[in-house]
Amino acid sequence: MNTLTRTAAATVESGVLLGVMTALFLIFFIAWVVWAYTPSRKAQLDAHAQLPFTDGGSE
């Protein structure tokens, strides 16, 4: 196998690896967003959204 063919094969292999990693990160991100915004978490998200407006009682 000549140098050009070897370099091309290495480039394709790394490209496939990067493509698989990108697809996995996209799947994890979408799953995280779906988990965060499920209706069962709405009460908890609303409570967290009000935290800046509550008195911490530190004074």
Image (spheres, rainbow, N blue to C red):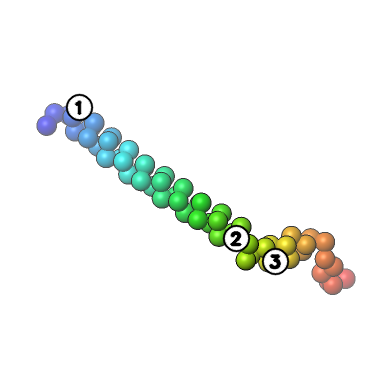
Please tell me which residue is depicted at 36% across the width and 42% down the height of the picture: 19
Say which label, 2 or 3, has the lower sequence index. 2
Query: Residue lying furthest front in this view?
Result: 39
Kind of residue at disc 3: Ala
Task: Name the residue that disc number 2 marks.
Answer: 38
Identify whether 52 is placed above or below 17: below
Is tag 2's residue or tag 1's residue first in the polypeptide sequence? Answer: 1
Q: Residues within 10 Å of mark 2 (few under 14, many from 20)?
A: few
Q: How many marks?
A: 3
Among numbered discs 1 and 3, the one appearing first in the sequence: 1
Q: Can you identify the residue that label 1 sits on?
A: 4
At 82% from the left and 69% from the top, the residue drawn is: 56
Residue 27, visible in the rendered structure: yes
- Which residue matches tag 3? 43
- In the rendered image, residue 32, in percent from the top left (x then y), is placed at 53, 56
> Pointer 2 and pointer 3: residues touching (CB < 8 Å)?
no
Q: Element under label 3?
A: helix
Badge 1 amino acid: Leu
Q: Nearer the viewer, residue 18 or 36?
A: 36
